[in-house]
Amino acid sequence: MHQLAIVTGASRGLGRAVATGLAAAGWDLVLDARGADALAAVAAGLPGRVVAVPGDITEADHREDLVAAADALGGATLVVNNAGALGPSPLPGLAEHPLDALREVFEANVFALLGLTQVALPGLRRRGGAVLNITSDAAVEHYAGWGGYGASKAAVELLSGVLAVEEPAIRVWWADPGDLRTDMHQDAFPGEDISDRPLPETVVPAVLHVLATRPDSGRIRLTEVEL
């Protein structure tokens, strides 16, 4: 069965780990990230058909290019919306949060995510595909300093839930990976030791299990998936 995933933010962290896991499982891939060299290095190290399309996910032309690259390989059956922005580091309280920076967070985490999904949806409907949106516990919990980022992820969760109702021909999952040892998480805690957090590779088996079993659309905590 043809399986092709578009994975955004694939040059590092969770995106790279998911791309690696998918490639090992036999998926074809179209990978996105802003850093062309880092993305090319990831793509070169993966088996199978892997196309790197560097660019900024907030740009409409780049989103079109990603779907076009997938169509050239037979069409996407999965979109993994992983790319995102944290905002200022260290994380500011809402009383001091720069609004321009907050707009950039929403542009990357919400508008770009929905924009790519919109472009991919016609093909996903035809193929009975799926959308996997990466969310965060900051979307549902109240942590000091996480108001800006958390608000953007809360918007992702709301959009995901509505999309699941509106698009019964596909699966829509919004997945909370938990705290992971990534560059973004380190940026949230500058100068702190985050080596106690698990590596992003630890949740990849849960992602692959979800894709294989195709549960109903909904919110998933990857650390609680029973393998």
Image: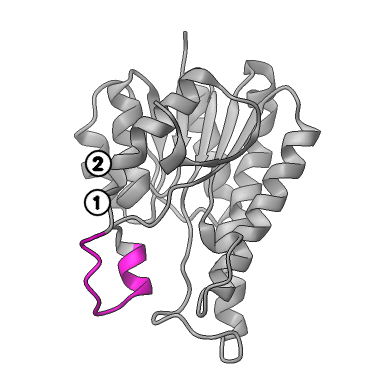
Q: Residue furthest bottom?
A: 96
Q: Nearer the viewer, residue 187 or 138?
A: 138
Question: Residues at badges 1 and 2 in contact (C-beta under 8 Å)?
Answer: no
Measure the C-alpha gap from mark 1 to mark 2.
9 Å
Q: Residue furthest top?
A: 1
Res. 114 visible in picture: yes
* Residue denoted by label 2: 42
Horizontal side, residue 226 vs residue 50: left or right: right
Looking at the rendering, the stretch of residues picked out in magenta corresponds to 184-196
At label 2, the amino acid type is Val
Image position, residue 162 (x, y; %): 77, 43
Colouring style: one colour
Q: Position of residue 69 (x, y in %)?
A: 47, 31
Residue 173 vertical placement versus 138 (above, below): above
Residue under the image location 30 percent in, 68 percent down: 186
**Residue bearing mark 1:** 37
Q: Residue at x 63, y 40 (%)?
A: 117
Residue 24, image x, y percentages: 27, 24
Residue 150 vertical position relative to residue 125 in the rendered view, above or below: below
Which quarter of the image is occupied by the C terminus?
A: top left
Asked if residue 50 can be seen in this view, the reply is no
Q: Does the magenta run of residues contain 186? A: yes
Residue 174 image-quadrant placement: top right
Q: Count neighbours of disc 1 (C-alpha within 10 A) and say few if under 14, some if 14 to 19, many if 20 or more.
A: few
Is 188 positioned to the left or the right of 166 in the image? Answer: left
| Magenta segment includes 150 | no
Q: Main SS type for the magenta part?
A: loop
Give the residue type at disc 1: Asp
